[in-house]
Image (cartoon, rainbow, N blue to C red):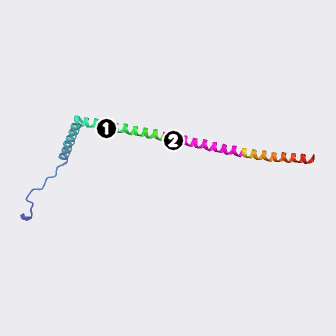
Amino acid sequence: MNAQYRNPKPSMRTPNFAERLSMANAAKKAQLERAKRIAEASERAKRLKVREETIADRNRRIAEREAAELTARQAAEAAAREAERQAREEAEARRLAEQTKRDAAETAEREAILAARREGRKKKKRRGR
């Protein structure tokens, strides 16, 4: 080859298997040490404690809200049942009042018919004398 086409820098040497394995082990060891430092950090422990407290507070508020909603729903259902019971009682009272009114009208009508018959019989008797 001509000298003008040659690369002035020597090409990079490819690491062999042992070198790659050594570098991987060194990287793994560095990563483990970093993870240990993070786990042991008191700031992290404080942050985790604050986070747990926040989660517990949120769960408590959610439970309180659900309990309040349940209570409100039960109160609404009880009020609806009471209103339905009152409506049934009122309807029954109206029905009974109407029935009593009809019975009274029928009784008065029967009494009027009977009175008219008696009156007719009395007139007959009077004419017969």
Q: Residue at x 49, y 39 (%)?
A: 75
SS class of the residue under badge 2?
helix
Residue in the picture at 26% in, 37% down: 47
Q: In the rendered view, does 86 fall on the left or right side of 8?
A: right
Circle nearer the viewer, 2 or 1: 2
Whether the magenta-drawn stretch holds residue 5 is answered as: no
Q: Quadrant of residue 67?
A: top left
Q: Position of residue 95 (x, y in %)?
A: 65, 45
Q: Nearer the viewer, residue 74 or 117?
A: 117
Percent position of residue 123, x then y: 87, 47
- Furthest residue in direction left, as rendered: 3
Q: Residue at x 31, y 36 (%)?
A: 53
Kind of residue at disc 2: Glu
Q: Residue 46, how many percent across, how many down? A: 25, 35
Q: Residue furthest right?
A: 129
Q: Considering the image in quadrants, where does the N terminus appear?
A: bottom left
Disc marking residue 63: none
**Is residue 91 a member of the stretch shown in magenta?**
yes
Q: Secondary structure at mark 1?
A: helix
Q: Which residue is mark 1?
A: 54
In x, y percent, where is residue 111? 78, 44
Residue range corresponding to the magenta coloring = 75-103
Mark 1 Cα-neighbour bin, 10 Å: few <14, some 14–19, many ≥20:
few
